[in-house]
Image (tube, rainbow, N blue to C red):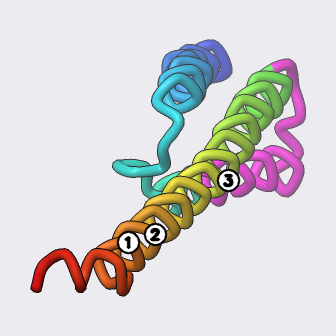
Amino acid sequence: MASLLEAIMLICFGLSWPLNAYKSYKARTAAGTSWQFIGLITIGYLAGIAAKFAGGGINWVLAVYFLNLAALGANWLVYFRNVRLDKERAAGKLEAAHAAAGATNSPALATRAE
């Protein structure tokens, strides 16, 4: 019974990770995503897996831990992709701002203003 309850808990948590990865993928930004949170959850799953091995409780529930860890891995991949996209957008905005600043500081515009 304990293994069944543990599996239900893992399945409930585990279903949220693919949904979260999909939502983050579609959002195309890491804004609002906490790498610290994903890291703590990853450590928690690794501790649960280690507990199974340390306690000799290796059973079918271990497979659910690994499935959840794989789904969490997808979240890491999407997070790092989104961080890259955010940096690319920020660099593009900087370039656009520099181009706009250069255009307003051009000698041709300065003579027109006088």
For disc 3, the marked residue is 80
- Marks 2 and 1: which is nearer the front? 1
Residue 83 image offset from top left, x and y in percent: 59, 56
Residue found at x 13% / y 78%? 113
Residue 25 image offset from top left, x and y in percent: 58, 28
In this view of the protein, can residue 10 be seen by the observer?
A: no
Check disc 3 and report its element: helix, strand or loop. helix
Q: Residues within 10 Å of mark 2 (few under 14, many from 20)?
A: few
What amino acid does circle 3 point to? Phe
Residue found at x 65% / y 56%? 84
- Marks 3 and 1: which is nearer the front? 1
Q: CA distance from mark 3 to mark 1?
A: 35 Å
Check disc 2 and report its element: helix, strand or loop. helix
Position of residue 74 relative to residue 81, above or below, is above
What amino acid does circle 2 point to? Ala
* Identity of the residue furthest to the left in this view: 114
- Marks 3 and 2: which is nearer the front? 2
Check disc 1 and report its element: helix, strand or loop. helix
Q: Nearer the viewer, residue 8 or 34?
A: 34
